[in-house]
Image (cartoon, grey):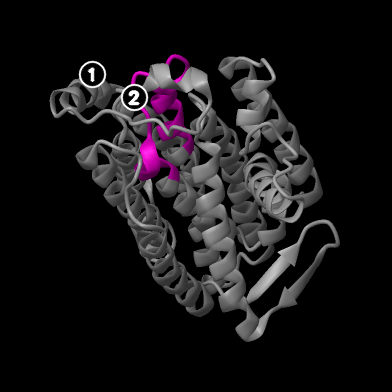
Amino acid sequence: MHDFYRIALAFMVAAAVVMALAPIFIPLLRRLKFGQVERAEGPHANTKKEGTPPMGGIMFIIGIIIAVLAFSKYQVAFWTSVPSLITMAAFGFVGFLDDFLKVRRKRNLGLRAYQKIIAQLLLSAAVAVFAYKHIGTEIYSAAFDTSFDLGWIYIPLVMFMVIAIVNGTNLTDGVDGLASGVTLVYSMAMGVMFLYLAGAFSKAFADSPILVAESDGMLSMAVFAFAVAGGCLGFLSCNSYPAKVFMGDTGSMALGGAICAMVLFSRHMFLFLLMGCCIVASTVSVVLQVGSYKLRHGKRIFRMAPLHHHFELTGHSETKIVAGYMIVTAFACMIALMLFM
Protein backbone atom coordinates (compact mmCIF):
# COMPACT_ATOMS: atom_id res chain seq x y z
CA MET A 1 0.00 0.00 0.00
CA HIS A 2 1.29 3.49 -0.89
CA ASP A 3 2.46 5.46 2.14
CA PHE A 4 0.08 8.34 1.45
CA TYR A 5 -2.89 5.97 1.53
CA ARG A 6 -1.71 4.45 4.82
CA ILE A 7 -1.62 7.88 6.41
CA ALA A 8 -4.93 9.06 4.93
CA LEU A 9 -6.66 5.84 5.93
CA ALA A 10 -5.25 6.01 9.47
CA PHE A 11 -6.74 9.51 9.80
CA MET A 12 -10.13 8.51 8.40
CA VAL A 13 -10.41 5.19 10.23
CA ALA A 14 -9.54 6.74 13.61
CA ALA A 15 -12.19 9.43 13.07
CA ALA A 16 -14.76 6.91 11.83
CA VAL A 17 -14.24 4.54 14.77
CA VAL A 18 -14.79 7.37 17.27
CA MET A 19 -17.94 8.57 15.50
CA ALA A 20 -19.24 4.98 15.32
CA LEU A 21 -18.57 4.41 19.04
CA ALA A 22 -20.17 7.66 20.22
CA PRO A 23 -23.86 6.60 19.81
CA ILE A 24 -23.10 3.42 21.79
CA PHE A 25 -20.61 4.67 24.35
CA ILE A 26 -22.28 7.92 25.48
CA PRO A 27 -25.68 6.33 26.37
CA LEU A 28 -23.77 3.53 28.14
CA LEU A 29 -21.96 6.06 30.34
CA ARG A 30 -25.30 7.72 31.13
CA ARG A 31 -26.88 4.39 32.08
CA LEU A 32 -23.95 3.70 34.38
CA LYS A 33 -24.59 7.16 35.92
CA PHE A 34 -21.08 8.32 35.11
CA GLY A 35 -21.66 12.07 35.29
CA GLN A 36 -19.13 14.90 35.50
CA VAL A 37 -18.85 16.61 38.88
CA GLU A 38 -17.75 20.22 38.35
CA ARG A 39 -15.31 21.94 40.68
CA ALA A 40 -16.94 24.29 43.15
CA GLU A 41 -14.27 26.89 42.34
CA GLY A 42 -14.77 26.59 38.58
CA PRO A 43 -16.48 29.16 36.33
CA HIS A 44 -20.12 29.57 37.39
CA ALA A 45 -21.33 28.83 33.86
CA ASN A 46 -19.80 25.36 34.05
CA THR A 47 -22.28 24.19 36.68
CA LYS A 48 -24.75 23.53 33.85
CA LYS A 49 -22.32 20.90 32.56
CA GLU A 50 -22.64 18.78 35.67
CA GLY A 51 -23.93 15.34 34.72
CA THR A 52 -22.23 15.25 31.30
CA PRO A 53 -20.43 11.90 31.15
CA PRO A 54 -16.61 11.96 31.26
CA MET A 55 -14.19 9.21 30.13
CA GLY A 56 -15.02 9.89 26.48
CA GLY A 57 -11.30 9.72 25.81
CA ILE A 58 -11.66 5.95 25.77
CA MET A 59 -13.34 6.29 22.37
CA PHE A 60 -10.46 8.03 20.62
CA ILE A 61 -7.89 5.84 22.38
CA ILE A 62 -9.61 2.83 20.81
CA GLY A 63 -9.86 4.56 17.43
CA ILE A 64 -6.19 5.57 17.41
CA ILE A 65 -5.00 2.10 18.44
CA ILE A 66 -7.06 0.41 15.69
CA ALA A 67 -5.88 2.86 13.02
CA VAL A 68 -2.20 2.69 13.96
CA LEU A 69 -2.08 -1.11 14.20
CA ALA A 70 -3.93 -1.43 10.90
CA PHE A 71 -1.79 0.93 8.84
CA SER A 72 1.72 1.06 10.36
CA LYS A 73 4.56 -0.86 8.76
CA TYR A 74 5.11 -3.82 11.06
CA GLN A 75 8.86 -3.99 10.39
CA VAL A 76 9.45 -0.75 12.29
CA ALA A 77 6.21 -0.19 14.22
CA PHE A 78 7.50 -2.20 17.20
CA TRP A 79 10.11 0.51 17.89
CA THR A 80 8.09 3.58 16.86
CA SER A 81 4.31 3.70 16.73
CA VAL A 82 3.70 0.79 19.14
CA PRO A 83 5.75 2.38 21.97
CA SER A 84 3.87 5.61 21.18
CA LEU A 85 0.56 3.77 21.60
CA ILE A 86 1.76 2.25 24.88
CA THR A 87 2.79 5.70 26.17
CA MET A 88 -0.60 7.12 25.21
CA ALA A 89 -2.51 4.23 26.77
CA ALA A 90 -0.43 4.17 29.96
CA PHE A 91 -1.06 7.82 30.75
CA GLY A 92 -4.67 7.36 29.69
CA PHE A 93 -5.00 4.55 32.24
CA VAL A 94 -3.78 6.85 35.04
CA GLY A 95 -6.37 9.38 33.91
CA PHE A 96 -9.03 6.66 33.81
CA LEU A 97 -8.34 5.75 37.44
CA ASP A 98 -8.69 9.42 38.37
CA ASP A 99 -11.98 9.75 36.44
CA PHE A 100 -13.39 6.51 37.81
CA LEU A 101 -12.75 7.53 41.41
CA LYS A 102 -14.39 10.91 40.79
CA VAL A 103 -17.60 9.45 39.39
CA ARG A 104 -17.68 6.71 42.01
CA ARG A 105 -17.30 9.16 44.89
CA LYS A 106 -19.65 11.69 43.21
CA ARG A 107 -17.23 14.53 43.85
CA ASN A 108 -14.32 16.16 42.09
CA LEU A 109 -11.65 14.19 43.91
CA GLY A 110 -9.99 11.27 42.21
CA LEU A 111 -6.45 10.13 42.75
CA ARG A 112 -4.60 12.03 45.45
CA ALA A 113 -1.86 14.40 44.35
CA TYR A 114 0.96 12.17 45.59
CA GLN A 115 -0.55 9.16 43.79
CA LYS A 116 -0.65 11.07 40.50
CA ILE A 117 2.90 12.30 40.98
CA ILE A 118 4.23 8.81 41.70
CA ALA A 119 2.43 7.35 38.68
CA GLN A 120 3.67 10.12 36.41
CA LEU A 121 7.24 9.85 37.69
CA LEU A 122 7.30 6.10 37.08
CA LEU A 123 5.82 6.39 33.59
CA SER A 124 8.03 9.34 32.61
CA ALA A 125 11.10 7.43 33.83
CA ALA A 126 10.12 4.42 31.69
CA VAL A 127 9.59 6.68 28.66
CA ALA A 128 12.94 8.43 29.26
CA VAL A 129 14.89 5.17 29.56
CA PHE A 130 13.26 3.79 26.40
CA ALA A 131 14.07 7.00 24.51
CA TYR A 132 17.64 7.00 25.86
CA LYS A 133 18.23 3.47 24.55
CA HIS A 134 16.25 3.45 21.31
CA ILE A 135 15.97 7.06 20.11
CA GLY A 136 19.27 8.44 21.34
CA THR A 137 20.40 11.41 23.38
CA GLU A 138 20.93 13.77 20.45
CA ILE A 139 18.33 16.50 19.98
CA TYR A 140 18.11 19.04 17.19
CA SER A 141 17.47 22.78 17.05
CA ALA A 142 15.63 23.80 13.89
CA ALA A 143 16.15 27.53 14.51
CA PHE A 144 19.95 27.22 14.70
CA ASP A 145 20.31 24.17 12.42
CA THR A 146 22.45 22.35 14.93
CA SER A 147 22.29 19.38 17.31
CA PHE A 148 23.19 18.67 20.91
CA ASP A 149 24.16 15.38 22.52
CA LEU A 150 22.80 15.64 26.04
CA GLY A 151 24.28 12.42 27.39
CA TRP A 152 22.91 11.40 30.80
CA ILE A 153 21.14 14.77 31.20
CA TYR A 154 18.72 13.52 28.55
CA ILE A 155 16.87 11.26 31.03
CA PRO A 156 15.89 13.88 33.67
CA LEU A 157 15.14 16.39 30.89
CA VAL A 158 12.78 13.95 29.16
CA MET A 159 11.11 13.12 32.48
CA PHE A 160 10.50 16.81 33.13
CA MET A 161 9.23 17.34 29.59
CA VAL A 162 6.84 14.38 29.72
CA ILE A 163 5.33 15.41 33.06
CA ALA A 164 5.03 19.03 31.90
CA ILE A 165 3.33 18.14 28.60
CA VAL A 166 0.93 15.60 30.12
CA ASN A 167 -0.16 17.99 32.86
CA GLY A 168 -0.25 20.93 30.45
CA THR A 169 -2.58 19.01 28.13
CA ASN A 170 -4.69 18.07 31.13
CA LEU A 171 -4.93 21.76 32.13
CA THR A 172 -5.90 22.73 28.57
CA ASP A 173 -8.93 20.44 28.75
CA GLY A 174 -11.28 22.92 30.40
CA VAL A 175 -13.53 24.14 27.57
CA ASP A 176 -15.67 22.05 25.20
CA GLY A 177 -13.47 20.92 22.30
CA LEU A 178 -10.36 22.82 23.40
CA ALA A 179 -7.84 20.03 24.09
CA SER A 180 -9.05 17.94 21.15
CA GLY A 181 -9.04 20.94 18.81
CA VAL A 182 -5.53 22.05 19.74
CA THR A 183 -4.20 18.47 19.57
CA LEU A 184 -5.86 17.97 16.17
CA VAL A 185 -3.93 20.90 14.68
CA TYR A 186 -0.69 20.01 16.45
CA SER A 187 -0.82 16.34 15.38
CA MET A 188 -1.43 17.18 11.74
CA ALA A 189 1.59 19.49 11.77
CA MET A 190 3.69 16.77 13.40
CA GLY A 191 2.47 14.33 10.75
CA VAL A 192 3.78 16.67 8.07
CA MET A 193 7.09 16.93 9.93
CA PHE A 194 7.43 13.14 10.11
CA LEU A 195 6.69 12.89 6.38
CA TYR A 196 9.45 15.41 5.71
CA LEU A 197 11.85 13.49 7.96
CA ALA A 198 11.00 10.25 6.16
CA GLY A 199 11.77 11.83 2.81
CA ALA A 200 15.00 13.37 4.07
CA PHE A 201 16.28 10.06 5.39
CA SER A 202 15.27 8.00 2.36
CA LYS A 203 16.73 10.42 -0.21
CA ALA A 204 19.95 11.32 1.55
CA PHE A 205 20.86 7.81 2.70
CA ALA A 206 19.25 5.51 0.15
CA ASP A 207 22.11 2.97 0.35
CA SER A 208 22.08 2.64 4.14
CA PRO A 209 19.72 -0.07 5.43
CA ILE A 210 19.85 1.45 8.93
CA LEU A 211 18.69 4.86 7.75
CA VAL A 212 16.14 3.39 5.35
CA ALA A 213 14.66 1.75 8.45
CA GLU A 214 14.81 5.20 10.08
CA SER A 215 12.82 6.55 7.13
CA ASP A 216 10.20 3.83 7.58
CA GLY A 217 10.12 4.65 11.28
CA MET A 218 9.28 8.27 10.50
CA LEU A 219 6.50 7.10 8.16
CA SER A 220 5.18 4.93 10.97
CA MET A 221 5.16 7.99 13.25
CA ALA A 222 3.36 9.96 10.52
CA VAL A 223 0.65 7.28 10.62
CA PHE A 224 0.52 7.66 14.40
CA ALA A 225 0.32 11.48 14.24
CA PHE A 226 -2.49 11.49 11.68
CA ALA A 227 -4.34 8.75 13.59
CA VAL A 228 -4.24 10.99 16.69
CA ALA A 229 -5.51 13.88 14.57
CA GLY A 230 -8.30 11.69 13.18
CA GLY A 231 -9.26 10.52 16.66
CA CYS A 232 -9.49 14.14 17.82
CA LEU A 233 -11.57 15.10 14.77
CA GLY A 234 -14.00 12.26 15.41
CA PHE A 235 -14.21 13.21 19.07
CA LEU A 236 -15.01 16.85 18.23
CA SER A 237 -18.26 15.62 16.67
CA CYS A 238 -19.56 14.96 20.18
CA ASN A 239 -17.23 17.15 22.28
CA SER A 240 -17.59 20.54 20.58
CA TYR A 241 -19.89 23.02 22.30
CA PRO A 242 -22.27 21.98 23.78
CA ALA A 243 -20.40 18.79 24.63
CA LYS A 244 -22.33 15.54 24.85
CA VAL A 245 -19.33 13.86 26.48
CA PHE A 246 -16.06 14.97 28.03
CA MET A 247 -12.73 13.29 27.40
CA GLY A 248 -11.92 13.47 31.12
CA ASP A 249 -8.44 12.90 32.49
CA THR A 250 -8.59 9.60 30.58
CA GLY A 251 -8.46 11.49 27.31
CA SER A 252 -6.39 14.54 28.21
CA MET A 253 -3.59 12.50 29.78
CA ALA A 254 -3.67 10.07 26.86
CA LEU A 255 -3.33 12.97 24.42
CA GLY A 256 -0.48 14.32 26.54
CA GLY A 257 1.25 10.94 26.27
CA ALA A 258 0.70 10.88 22.50
CA ILE A 259 2.17 14.38 22.14
CA CYS A 260 5.21 13.35 24.20
CA ALA A 261 5.83 10.40 21.88
CA MET A 262 5.69 12.65 18.83
CA VAL A 263 8.07 15.17 20.41
CA LEU A 264 10.61 12.49 21.35
CA PHE A 265 10.62 10.66 18.02
CA SER A 266 10.94 13.92 16.09
CA ARG A 267 14.10 14.73 18.12
CA HIS A 268 13.09 18.40 17.93
CA MET A 269 12.14 18.85 21.56
CA PHE A 270 12.42 22.64 21.64
CA LEU A 271 9.95 23.07 18.76
CA PHE A 272 7.16 22.05 21.14
CA LEU A 273 7.53 25.40 22.93
CA LEU A 274 6.33 27.00 19.69
CA MET A 275 4.02 24.37 18.22
CA GLY A 276 2.41 23.61 21.58
CA CYS A 277 2.31 27.26 22.65
CA CYS A 278 -1.33 27.07 23.79
CA ILE A 279 -0.57 24.09 26.03
CA VAL A 280 2.50 25.91 27.32
CA ALA A 281 0.35 29.00 27.97
CA SER A 282 -2.09 26.95 30.06
CA THR A 283 0.75 25.63 32.22
CA VAL A 284 2.54 28.97 32.58
CA SER A 285 -0.69 30.78 33.47
CA VAL A 286 -1.28 28.39 36.37
CA VAL A 287 2.31 28.73 37.61
CA LEU A 288 2.10 32.54 37.43
CA GLN A 289 -1.29 32.61 39.14
CA VAL A 290 -0.18 30.40 42.03
CA GLY A 291 3.11 32.26 42.37
CA SER A 292 1.39 35.65 42.36
CA TYR A 293 -1.21 34.52 44.90
CA LYS A 294 1.44 33.26 47.33
CA LEU A 295 4.10 35.95 46.84
CA ARG A 296 1.78 38.96 46.51
CA HIS A 297 -0.52 38.11 49.44
CA GLY A 298 -3.55 36.89 47.54
CA LYS A 299 -3.25 39.10 44.46
CA ARG A 300 -3.99 37.39 41.16
CA ILE A 301 -2.76 38.06 37.61
CA PHE A 302 -5.72 36.44 35.85
CA ARG A 303 -9.36 36.29 36.84
CA MET A 304 -8.92 32.55 36.85
CA ALA A 305 -6.31 30.06 35.67
CA PRO A 306 -5.72 28.22 33.36
CA LEU A 307 -5.81 31.01 30.79
CA HIS A 308 -8.92 29.81 28.93
CA HIS A 309 -10.99 30.29 32.10
CA HIS A 310 -9.73 33.88 32.26
CA PHE A 311 -11.06 34.40 28.74
CA GLU A 312 -14.37 32.80 29.75
CA LEU A 313 -14.76 35.19 32.68
CA THR A 314 -13.96 38.20 30.49
CA GLY A 315 -16.98 37.39 28.31
CA HIS A 316 -15.59 35.24 25.48
CA SER A 317 -17.73 32.29 24.40
CA GLU A 318 -16.38 28.75 24.49
CA THR A 319 -16.57 28.44 20.70
CA LYS A 320 -14.57 31.68 20.30
CA ILE A 321 -11.91 30.49 22.74
CA VAL A 322 -11.54 27.13 20.97
CA ALA A 323 -11.39 28.79 17.54
CA GLY A 324 -8.78 31.25 18.82
CA TYR A 325 -6.62 28.53 20.34
CA MET A 326 -6.79 26.44 17.15
CA ILE A 327 -5.89 29.44 14.98
CA VAL A 328 -2.94 30.37 17.20
CA THR A 329 -1.76 26.75 17.19
CA ALA A 330 -2.06 26.58 13.41
CA PHE A 331 0.02 29.74 12.93
CA ALA A 332 2.61 28.58 15.46
CA CYS A 333 2.87 25.20 13.73
CA MET A 334 3.29 26.83 10.32
CA ILE A 335 6.11 29.01 11.66
CA ALA A 336 7.72 25.93 13.24
CA LEU A 337 7.49 23.96 10.00
CA MET A 338 9.05 26.86 8.10
CA LEU A 339 11.95 26.89 10.58
CA PHE A 340 12.20 23.11 10.38
CA MET A 341 12.19 22.77 6.62
Q: Position of residue 28 (x, y in %)?
A: 16, 26
Alpha carbon distance from label 1 to label 2: 11 Å
Disc 1 element: helix
* Residue 85 disc label: none
Q: Nearer the viewer, residue 317 or 149?
A: 317
Location of residue 6 by image quarter: top left
How many marks can you see? 2
Density class for disc 1 (Cα within 10 Å; few <14, some 14-19, many ≥20) is few
Left or right: 154 as drawn, with respect to 274: left
Instruction: Determine the residue positioned at 39% across, 30% down.
Output: 38
Q: In this view, does 328 lie above or below 316?
A: below
Residue under pointer 1: 23
Left or right: 269 as drawn, with respect to 182: right
Question: Label 2 sits on what residue type?
Answer: Val
Left or right: 329 as drawn, with respect to 221: right
Location of the N terminus by quadrant is top left
Mark 1 vs 2, N-terminal side: 1
Question: Label 1 sits on what residue type?
Answer: Pro
Disc 2 element: loop
Left or right: 125 as drawn, with respect to 271: left
Q: Give the range drawn in magenta.
A: 229-252
Residue under pointer 2: 245
Q: Is residue 245 visible?
A: yes
Location of residue 40 by image quarter: top left
Asked if residue 239 is among those painted magenta in the image, a careful observer would answer yes
Q: Where is residue 282 in the image (x, y as percent from the top left)?
A: 63, 42
Q: In this view, does 226 lie above or below 292?
A: above
Q: Position of residue 226 (x, y in %)?
A: 48, 39
